Image: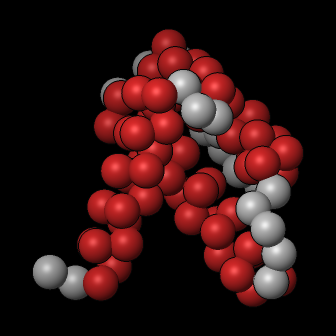
Amino acid sequence: MSNDRTVRDGFLATVEQQIASGDPPEVRATHERLCASGLTPGEAAQMIAIVLRNEMKQMISEARSFDNAHFAQMLDKLPTLP
């Protein structure tokens, strides 16, 4: 198994857990919104995982804490991102 796939699966598992638990609520709301727009649950989860991965990358590169407000703003831009 490649590292890229392991990382992707890890982010997807995190998103699926967030959807199931409703924490943070923005993840479940975004998932529901994306599914209502015609995406499959899997496609919606993958898009959210991309946003999560990008936020985590920024967090590491900037040596800062996770920014939930920024994460929520990026989720609001799905299904398209600038």
Residue located farthest toward the left when viewing the structure as drawn: 1
Point 75% across, 62% down: residue = 66
* Residue at screen point 69% across, 40% down: 75
| Residue 5 as seen in the image, left or right of residue 47 | left
Residue 51 spot, x, y in % from top left? 62, 54
Percent of width and height locating residue 13: 35, 50
Q: Position of residue 29 (x, y in %)?
A: 61, 22
Q: Quadrant of the N terminus?
A: bottom left
Q: Is residue 66 above or below residue 71?
A: below
73 relative to 40, above or below: below
Above or below 71: residue 41: above
Residue drawn at point x = 83 percent, y = 51 percent: 70
Closest to the observer, 81 or 61: 61
The coloring applied to the image is secondary structure
Considering only vertical position in the picture, is 71 above or below 64? Answer: above
Say if residue 47 shows up in the picture.
Answer: no
Task: Indicate the quadrant where residue 54 lies.
Answer: bottom right
* Residue sitting at x 30%, y 84%: 3
Quarter containing the C terminus: bottom right
State left or right for residue 12 relative to residue 29: left
The percent coordinates of residue 23 (x first, y second) are: 59, 32
Classify residue 33 by image quadrant. top right
**Is 32 displayed left or right of 60 in the figure?**
left
Q: Is residue 49 visible?
A: yes
Please tell me which residue lies in front, 40 or 60.
Answer: 60
